[in-house]
Amino acid sequence: MKKVSTATPLSIQDIKHKTKNTRLPTLRFMFFQKWHALILLLVLAVIPSTIAYAQTPSEPVTPGAPPEAQPQMLQLETPQPQAVQPAIPPQATQPETPPPSSQEQPGTIVLNFEDADLKDVLQTIGEITGENFIIAPGVAAKITVQTSKPILTRDVFGIFESIIEVYGLSAIKSGAFYKIVPSNTARQRSIEILQGKDAKGLPSGDRIVTQVVPIEFISANDLFPILQPMLSPAGNIMNYPKANTLIIADILSNIKKILDMTEILDVDTFKKMQIEVFTLKNTTTRTIQKELTDIIAPLGIGQFALIPLERFNSIVVFSPSSQLIESIREWIERLDRNVSEDAALIHFYYVKNDKAANIKALLEQIFILRPPPPGVRIEGEIRLYTYDPANALLIQATANDYNTIMETIKKLDNQPKQVLIEALIAEVSLSDSTNFGIQWSILSGHVNAQGPNPSIIGSSALTMGTLPTPSSLSPPSGLSFLVTDSSKFFSIIQALASEGKVNILSNPHIVVKNNDKAFINVGKDIPVATQSQQTSITGTTGIIQNIEYKKTGVILTVAPQINEERTVILNIKQEVSDIAENITVGQTGFTYPSFTKRESETTVITKDGEALVIGGLIKEDKRESYTGIPLLMDIPILGYLFRYTTHSTARTELVILLIPKVMDGNAEAANITGEFKKRVEEMIKEWKIEAPLPLQGKKE
């Protein structure tokens, strides 16, 4: 191939551009204008011969052809005097260059750059398209491109964008200029914003733009992971779920492909979908749904969906195939046949929130042991069984009877309410001012009864109205309690504890289901000899004793019942017992331990979160102590002369605080659990307890 050197023709605009900033005196400028015209005529005369000389030598130019009919070949002279290499891989065959006459088309041009500098390429493209360019700092490239066939001049700019995209560059429109920047930073600049999802309306080219794509029929969250792999290295996609919109920044050619994929996926599902509703007469919707799925799905004959409407005993069928819907119609007619009373079916129901035996007992009372309620029709015989390992209920009945029973089961098998019971059991030492019990000091001004109808229930001498003073009260004859504010009660306990007058026996927290019983025991099991007998075997005397264990300590039993208004009925039984001195029983001289016991049992009504204080269980301990001269005070009879006997009496009152908190559902249970956790953390922080480390495996 011959080395052909061509000169880039200069237009009048080029020459004017080169000389427009030159300032000359008036006479010299007029002289220059004359030479200017001469030079222009010479250039116009040389251009046709120059273009003809740039063609292949073996293909002479047809004489007499007008200059504008010749193909416009713009080729930049490479700096190295080497032959021009083809811009295709070595294994590809270089296409034959057609004769110039076959390339002659008006408004076309041939581009041929061989290792040309980016600035030179931009200058040429600017002369062809009339666009202005600004090159970002640090941007440089050597461009090689060959077009074997003429291209339209109006397509030059789009081809130019594709060329620089290969070299990792992008053209960003900015006013009257295009900025040439690296593609990886182009999306961070001010780029053109387009809207819509029609790929046909996009302009040509490979510049980077931002496309706002509204999604109509499907979720943008579902479409996002499908389109993301289709992006170019310089592209980016963002999801705006509030408007169900995708925002894509990428080159135009790639955005067209993404919009084509979006158009395929974002379609109205129901537009081509056929819907039929079938009302069942003898079978349940769940049964038909399962049987149809088991029959049709393995055949793989088409897409379909079955939605049961239990309230209407109907089933909705979705499918794009009308033939498949007809097949499903035939199967429904076969399966929804009349079931006779003698052909009752076995139905399984797994009880979720109660024991299957409890549900069974209620259903027997309603449907079997008694006539059915008014308005309820039972067609055949109903039999109920329970399977305890799975907590399941087996119902033998016709389909219609089963549907009737299920309406009752769903109302019975609801998540039950629960109660968190916070209890505080303490012994308060009574002084002279509280000789009749701690409740009188509470009522004399420390704590007031709460609620719209404050009341005090029990066997004390209190009446409604103005609270009496301690001096005007008679001693209580038994248990008394009041409903009060828990925070105020705790302040009283803390005040007494600061004086060493309170001994907290237990502070349990327990959760119990509605109408169940909660049992708390904090104490010891004391062995007690219930029977002792002396024996004499072979001359040896022995003692045979029967031993039983007796529970002592704090024993609390609470059975709550929750009403719809969130009031709680509490059946409370409280016992505090302890071992006392041994007592000699009978003539045999056997000694047995004695026990002190304080017990209260009552039923009260309180509101959710309201504190209940129980008091009035007073214990009196009489003690006798001796002081005197050692040894002499122990002499029988005469020892009384050398010792001093002190008699003391200690009175304590058992006080119980109960706070029930209703938990109706998982949300309330989570809130109460969070409050309890926070209190534990505060207690750990206040008492400076070292919290255990979380289980994170072995540390090196």
Image (tube, helix red, strand yellow):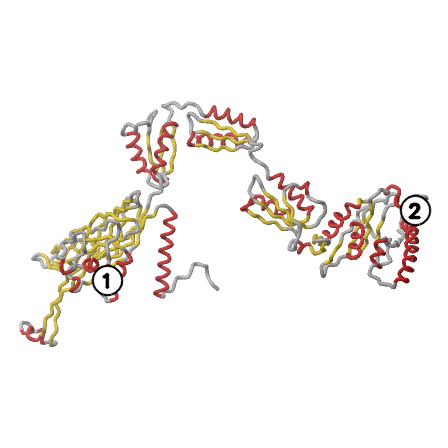
Tell me where residue 141 appears, x and y as whole percent: 75, 57
Left or right of residue 244, residue 20 in this image: right
For label 1, count other residues whose C-alpha is less than 10 Å away and answer few (under 14), some (14-19) or many (20+): some
Instruction: Please tell me in which quadrant of the rendered image residue 283 appears.
Output: top left
Q: Is residue 566 shown above or below 308? A: below
**Count of all numbered marks drawn on residues in the image:** 2
Left or right of residue 569, residue 96 in this image: right
Secondary structure state at the residue bearing disc 1: strand
- Nearer the observer, 376 or 323: 376
Q: Name which residue type carries label 1.
A: Asn
Q: Residue furthest front?
A: 26
Left or right of residue 247, residue 43 in this image: right
- The reply to whether residue 36 is visible in this rendering is yes
Q: Which residue is mark 1?
A: 503
Label number found at residue 441: none
* Cα–Cα gap, marks 2 and 1: 119 Å
Q: Earlier along the polypeptide chain: callout 2 or callout 1?
A: 2
Q: Name which residue type carries label 2.
A: Ser
Label number found at residue 58: 2
- The reply to whether residue 619 is visible in this rendering is no
